């Protein structure tokens, strides 16, 4: 591929230690991100997608949580091996992050302009005046009218959609290589969500950055992501281009998830569901973690955990069905290998 | 979807208003009012599911709460089986409430953490004196099985359950008094997709088996499509469009409804529409726009829209829109 | 806001009436006749009776009280029964001293309390944190007069570093201010600690970290400003107990402030002085509370609208 790899994550493991035991929130996650690409990480609650994103910037709350293994290579530098000082230089500068709750993610007692400007002063060494001007420009860039006035306001004076735009302005002020968006539109109304997605996509074109977009909303990833990684129980279970994933999902979980979405433009008598529930991160089963809910599971699945296999160019799946040893039914009429 | 062959609506809401008066900040300033629900009218026939959709601040949840008088309505009527709930006294209201129940959004907040499921269901049954004490045990086991939970779970406390299970408990509680109509206030919004599907299937099944009527409040149009017979769209406290499901989805008339549909990210490319991005934000409910409250963001707004409030009028027998130019905009 | 302030200012009237009435009644109920005490040992019955008549103590209670209120409305607080000096002047000569003492005490409360609270919050459950919190617990539990006497014993009597009593030099301020401020410092420390711990777990602190801001900036600029909001109320409330504390501390250290004046006046049953002193203290309390409430509301406008 002529694209260059901007971020490479290898075998990331983030565990949480408490009196209840060890929760393996992120348990061997690997993926790559190319320049200019938008990677979607999808999954339901508890799958580990948010912890994965927090781990990338080492923001995991550190008494209970700990990144115990893995490599996070940003342009070939391992973030996990950086000193605190070096790490701070990357945060907000080379890799930025926006979060789910714009209400609580902004400091209530500082003006929004100052919250953007301090980042600029820190990473780009501009003077107060220059940084403020640039902050105002960023606010304009994200489509907020009267940016000079707004910059002086405090978060409580802005609506939810506007606050999220400020978060975006803050994250992109230093033109990072990678933007990590952790459920940025989940807390917003759907019409506001459309605005925010529009802004993110436009800015991506303008600034040429790569995006990791974390969400549980399959519709959103279908629209904006080039590549998707599906997570379940702390692991990536399927990875592929957006088109191929929705056209022909390989993993039974991905398939089950897509099938259980109510369709907006078609009538359904009954929704197909995935029966059962997610296993507890304190107590994952030995074999495939999806086996107890999978209609195709065999003994092999229950006894051994499958690896993430590359099935085709750009398509990976963690499922015994795609290995040579498989002897059960298949999801597809023909195997994709 | 079968609707019962009755002619009388089970629930009639006429010109419901819910205005919240804010504490006066300035000594001589004007009294600030939030008109959360500003003249909403609709009927629900027995056995059908009417959904109310809209974004935050549109008044859909407040409408649901006002119908039950969880917030006292400022004006309007709510006729349940022809009797007005709004001017009932406490005793009459309590009796009426056994016919109309509610399931809330947050499965973690709507159950008392200090009560076992058994205590909660017993209390529900005892308050309404629906089930004599000697039959309560059997009824509770029946309820648990109706919602797909094992009877042993009766002894447990809410914190021992997952979100989906708690929502099932909420449904069991609502069913405990044999209601005729249940208001579901964003009841699946806090659940994961796979759990949401389970709960939606359960609700549909219960509707068939127990001949229930639903008022389903949600912001998620795909869910609403699946479960409704008719849909009502709200914006800033008013109804902008109300129609049967197919009519609304194939031919939405109101510009807001159209923008709403176009904003929803859709997986299947063939259904993706040209996105109508609304300009600006929702106006403050403290100072709603004059005339049509949507005119500040409407791509088709004219002077007439700024001046006159459009009435909710019928385009077809089953489709009403509140827009001056509804016919021209299709 | 204006409405709020006006409402609170209107409270001054019932407070004044309430305080003066309560003090008056209590003074009447305490055994001991001012005339007898004033006349001294060995005074004859006639002297005492005459004194009583002159001091107006024979009038019916209701009349004594309403006379007092009438005079008060004209700005006259009456005269001391002991030396016949206007109460108002007694108060104005001693109030500044108490205010100075209170000022330095609050300074100690805030400075010590904040520093201890912040240090504890930065490294929660560490040895430093536990140690500071234990000291804070002592600060709250030890009665101020006991602490005062202890400090006096150690620093004045044993070590001779500081003077024992009086109010003449800068050195004289230290022990009384520390004694009075210690309890408040302890409360502020604990409050700051818990408020900081709560703030540090908020989403916006995570955002600040994600921007790559340095640690001390996150603490001082982002966290502290938010954490201080509830602490302000605590400091305001502290002022109330501070006023009460001045009574004890001034007595222990023989400082000639308002507190000591009231204590002495109670002892000699000098009713007008007690009334005047307590009334002034109450009004100061009301105003401080109002000020703190206004400050709090100002900060909270942000919170409410969130």
Image (cartoon, coloured by chain):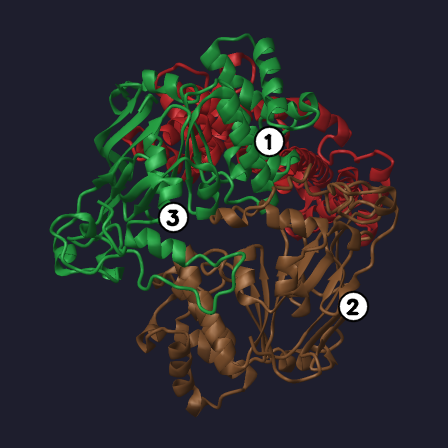
Q: Is residue C305 left or right of residue A274?
A: right
Quadrant holding the N terminus of chain C: top right
Determine the image quadrant of residue C258. top right
Colour-to-chain, green: A
Residues marked 1 and 3, same chain = no
Residue carrying label 3: A247
Colour-to-chain, brown: B
Q: Nearer the viewer, mark 2 or mark 1?
A: 2
User: Label 1 marks which chain's residue?
Assistant: C
Q: Is residue A322 left or right of residue C190?
A: left
Image height check: is C12 above or below A283? above
Q: Nearer the viewer, mark 1 or mark 3?
A: 3
Residue carrying label 1: C260
Q: Is residue C224 left or right of residue C300?
A: left
Q: Please provide percent x and percent y for residue A172.
A: 50, 23
Q: Please provide percent x and percent y for residue C184.
A: 49, 33
Residue carrying label 2: B76
Q: Is residue C263 visible?
A: no
Q: Please provide percent x and percent y for residue B150.
A: 32, 75
């Amino acid at each position: 591929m002529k694209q260059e790899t901007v971020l490479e994550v290898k075998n990331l493991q983030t565990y949480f230690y408490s009196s209840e035991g060890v929760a393996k929130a992120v348990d061997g996650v690997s993926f790559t991100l190319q320049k200019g690409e938008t990677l979607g990480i999808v999954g339901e609650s508890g799958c580990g997608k948010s912890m994965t994103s927090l781990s990338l910037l080492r923001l995991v709350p550190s008494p209970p949580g700990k990144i115990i293994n893995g490599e996070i290579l940003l342009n070939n530098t391992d973030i996990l091996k950086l000193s605190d000082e070096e790490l701070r230089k990357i945060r907000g500068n080379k890799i930025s992050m926006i979060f789910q709750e714009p209400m609580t993610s902004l400091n209530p007692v500082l003006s929004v302009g100052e919250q953007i400007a301090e980042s600029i002063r820190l990473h780009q060494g501009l003077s107060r005046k220059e940084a403020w001007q640039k902050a105002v420009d960023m606010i304009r860039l994200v489509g907020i009218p009267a940016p000079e006035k707004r910059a002086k306001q405090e978060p409580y004076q802005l609506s939810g959609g506007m606050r999220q735009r400020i978060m975006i302005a803050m994250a992109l002020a230093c033109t990072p290589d990678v933007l990590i968006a952790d459920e940025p539109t989940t807390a917003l109304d759907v019409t506001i969500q459309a605005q925010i997605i529009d802004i993110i996509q436009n800015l991506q074109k303008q600034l040429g950055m790569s995006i990791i977009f974390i969400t549980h909303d399959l519709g959103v990833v279908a629209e904006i992501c080039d590549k998707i990684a599906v997570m379940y129980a702390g692991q990536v279970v399927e990875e592929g281009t957006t088109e191929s994933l929705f056209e022909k999902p390989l993993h039974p979980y991905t398939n089950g998830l897509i099938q259980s979405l109510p369709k907006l433009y078609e009538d359904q008598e009954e929704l197909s569901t995935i029966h059962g529930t997610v296993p507890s991160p304190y107590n994952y089963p030995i074999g495939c973690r999806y086996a107890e809910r999978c209609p195709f599971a065999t003994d092999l699945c229950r006894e051994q955990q499958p690896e993430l296999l590359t099935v085709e160019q750009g398509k990976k799946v963690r499922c015994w069905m795609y290995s040579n040893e498989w002897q059960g039914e298949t999801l597809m009429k023909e195997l994709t290998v | 979807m079968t609707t019962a062959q009755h002619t009388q609506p089970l629930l009639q809401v006429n010109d419901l208003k819910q205005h919240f008066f804010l504490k006066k900040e300035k000594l001589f300033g004007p009294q600030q009012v939030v008109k959360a629900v500003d003249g909403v009218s609709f009927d629900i026939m027995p056995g059908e599911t009417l959904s109310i959709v809209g974004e935050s601040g549109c008044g859909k949840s407040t409408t649901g709460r006002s119908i039950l008088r969880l917030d006292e309505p400022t004006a309007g009527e709510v006729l349940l089986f022809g009797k007005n709930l709004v001017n009932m006294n406490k005793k009459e209201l309590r009796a009426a409430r056994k016919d109309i129940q509610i399931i809330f959004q947050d499965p973690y907040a709507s159950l008392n953490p200090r009560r076992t499921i058994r205590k909660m269901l017993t209390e529900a049954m005892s308050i309404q004196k629906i089930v004599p004490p000697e039959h309560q045990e059997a009824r509770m086991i029946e309820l648990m099985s109706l919602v797909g939970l094992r009877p042993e779970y009766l002894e447990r406390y809410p914190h021992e359950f997952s979100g989906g299970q708690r929502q099932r408990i909420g449904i069991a509680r609502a069913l405990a008094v044999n209601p005729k109509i249940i208001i579901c206030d964003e009841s699946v919004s806090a659940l994961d997709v796979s759990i949401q599907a389970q709960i939606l299937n359960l609700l549909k099944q219960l509707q068939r088996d127990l001949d229930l009527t639903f008022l389903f409040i949600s912001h998620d149009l795909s869910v609403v499509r699946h479960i409704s017979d008719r849909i009502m769209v709200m914006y800033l406290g008013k109804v902008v469009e109300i129609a049967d499901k197919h009519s609304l989805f194939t031919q939405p008339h109101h510009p807001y409804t159209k923008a709403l549909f176009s904003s929803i990210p859709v997986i299947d490319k063939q259904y993706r529409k040209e996105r109508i991005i609304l300009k600006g934000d929702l106006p403050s409910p403290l100072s709603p726009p004059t005339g049509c409250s949507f005119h500040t963001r409407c791509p088709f707004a004219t002077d007439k829209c700024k001046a006159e409030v459009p009435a909710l009028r019928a385009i077809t027998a089953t489709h009403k829109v509140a827009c001056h130019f509804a016919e021209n905009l299709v | 806001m204006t409405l709020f302030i006006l409402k609170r200012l209107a409270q001054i009237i019932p407070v004044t009436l309430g305080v003066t009435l309560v003090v008056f009644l209590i003074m009447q109920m305490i055994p001991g006749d001012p005339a007898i005490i004033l006349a001294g040992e060995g005074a004859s019955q006639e002297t005492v009776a005459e004194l009583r008549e002159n001091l107006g103590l024979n009038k019916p209670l209701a009349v004594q009280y309403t006379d007092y209120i009438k005079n008060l409305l004209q700005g006259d607080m009456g005269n001391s029964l002991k030396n016949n000096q206007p109460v108002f002047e007694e108060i104005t000569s001693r109030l500044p001293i108490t205010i100075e003492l209170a000022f330095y005490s609050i300074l100690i409360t805030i400075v010590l309390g904040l520093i201890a609270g912040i240090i504890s919050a930065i490294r929660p459950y560490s040895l430093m944190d536990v140690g500071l919190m234990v000291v804070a617990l002592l600060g709250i539990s030890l009665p101020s007069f006991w602490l005062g006497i202890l400090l006096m014993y150690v620093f004045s009597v044993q070590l001779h570093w500081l003077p024992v009593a009086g109010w003449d030099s800068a050195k004289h301020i230290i022990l009384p201010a520390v004694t009075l401020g210690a309890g408040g410092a302890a409360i502020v420390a604990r409050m700051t600690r818990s408020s900081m711990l709560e703030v540090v777990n908020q989403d916006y602190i995570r955002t600040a970290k994600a921007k790559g801001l340095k640690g001390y900036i996150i603490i001082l600029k982002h966290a502290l400003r938010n954490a201080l909001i509830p602490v302000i109320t605590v400091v305001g409330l502290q002022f109330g107990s501070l006023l009460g504390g001045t009574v004890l501390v001034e007595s222990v250290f023989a400082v000639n402030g308002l507190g000591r004046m009231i204590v002495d006046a109670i002892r000699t049953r000098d009713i007008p002085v007690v009334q005047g002193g307590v009334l002034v203290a109450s009004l100061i309390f009301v105003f401080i509370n109002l000020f703190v409430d206004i400050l709090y509301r100002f900060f909270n406008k942000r919170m409410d609208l969130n």
